[in-house]
Image: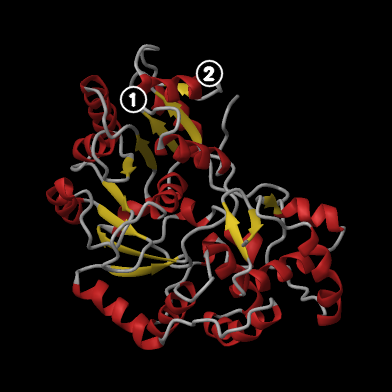
Amino acid sequence: MSHKIQLTRLADFCHLPPMDEKRELSSDERLAWLRLIRSENVGPITFFQLLGRFKTAQNALDALPELARKGGRKKPIRICPLAEAKREAEAVSAFGGRLLAACEPDYPPALRMIADPPPVISIKGHAQLLNRDILAVVGARNSSAVAIRLTQEIAGSLSQENIVIASGLARGIDTAAHQASLTGGTIAVVGGGIDYPYPRENKALQEQIYEQGCVIAEQPFAIVPQARHFPRRNRIISGMALGVLVVEASPRSGSLITARMALEQGREIFAVPGSPMDPRARGTNNLIRSGAILTESADDILEALQSIRTRPLKEPDQPLLPFGDPVQPEEQELDRVRPNVLEFLSPTPVAIDEIVRLTNQPPAVVLTILLELELAGRIERHFGNRVSIVP
């Protein structure tokens, strides 16, 4: 199978300005965006649904308590205080970085088009790299010497061809990819705060990337990375790229999670084959068996990316679900349908479009109910546009 690029514009779901109408936020607007995404139970998808419905982040902040109450929340929802948002913004600035919102010109255009882009990211380094052609490179932390050498050769060659290399700053393949592309342009997406070096052994490399490349973080400043942060980091690595190269990966590795996310985001998948005797090659060999492009050199990638690099980003003809439907349901209709939606929710994640189909209700009604339930802390969102009830 061939994994063609199909980038879904955020504007299709949330009525944000299209790609050619990007704008800088005022400092007050940026703080409101930061407060909204840092508020309790507000994730990226919920953030943009709120923004599409209430037009401004400040209006959405004002509406949070009532929406959470309608979803069944008993105690007040925690809204990020203005002083807290100001402290984070000032800390990022004092560190030499800046906050970047999804509607602003320097925000990576491909990342802005995934289903759940981070509304606000911290960056430090050369922001112009974020708007160039990007290839993500991921692989095993305990990588072989052969894989390290091949990664360096491929990343170095692609860097010379004006392709920016993005990775996660982990040891092994990530480190090799960053080191080989420092002079041509590399982006490191970290799992904690933008200031936190992880792993510690890559502290010097992270400092080099601050100076020569660009470091991105979704988590707040000074946050220590935790295991639950890395899948979210991985969707940024794949989301900002035209494609993802997997060099070595065991069958249950984080690199294969990144590849799966890339596939759902419509990105091209490249994989380096390996010996069937090496467990680190099983994941990549399975990717090739499933249709990923067999990759032995940078030329294999350049050939596949040629058509992608020359055609503009565009949305599919029919978005799967009209997030941010401008028609707001009546309260009586929501009260009538809410029990029906709850009936189809369980601890097992279910696709939102399946709930729409099973309830036979307008998407705007179902999405509004799910929005209220999430703000109340009663449901959890999962990758792949799925939700589950919180036990």
Q: Looking at the image, which is closer to me, 171 or 268? A: 171
The three-letter amino acid code for the residue at tag 2 is Arg
**Residue 341: x %, y % from top left:** 79, 63
> SS of the residue at dot 2?
helix
In the rendered view of the protein, which quadrant contains the N terminus?
top right
User: Residue at 28% of width from left, 38% of height from top?
Assistant: 174
Whether residue 363 can be seen here: no
Q: Looking at the image, which is closer to me, 235 or 53? A: 235
User: Residue at 87% of width from left, 58% of height from top?
Assistant: 360
107 relative position to 176: left or right: right
The residue tagged 2 is 289
Q: Which mark is residue 377?
A: none
**Residue 161: x %, y % from top left:** 30, 34
181 relative position to 134: left or right: left
User: Residue at 36% of width from left, 16% of height from top?
Assistant: 274
**Residue 329: x %, y % from top left:** 80, 75
Whether residue 38 can be seen here: yes
Q: Looking at the image, which is closer to me, 104 or 67? A: 67
185 relative position to 203: left or right: right
The residue tagged 1 is 298
> SS of the residue at dot 1?
helix
**Residue 140: x %, y % from top left:** 32, 32
Q: Earlier in the sequence, mark 1 or mark 2?
A: 2
- Residue farthest toward the front in the current orientation of the protein: 391
Within-10-Å neighbours for mark 1: few <14, some 14–19, many 20+? some
Which is in the foreground here, disc 1 or disc 2? Answer: 2
In the rendered view of the protein, which quadrant contains the C terminus?
bottom right
Compared to 292, does 141 lie above or below? below
> Which image quadrant for residue 155?
top left
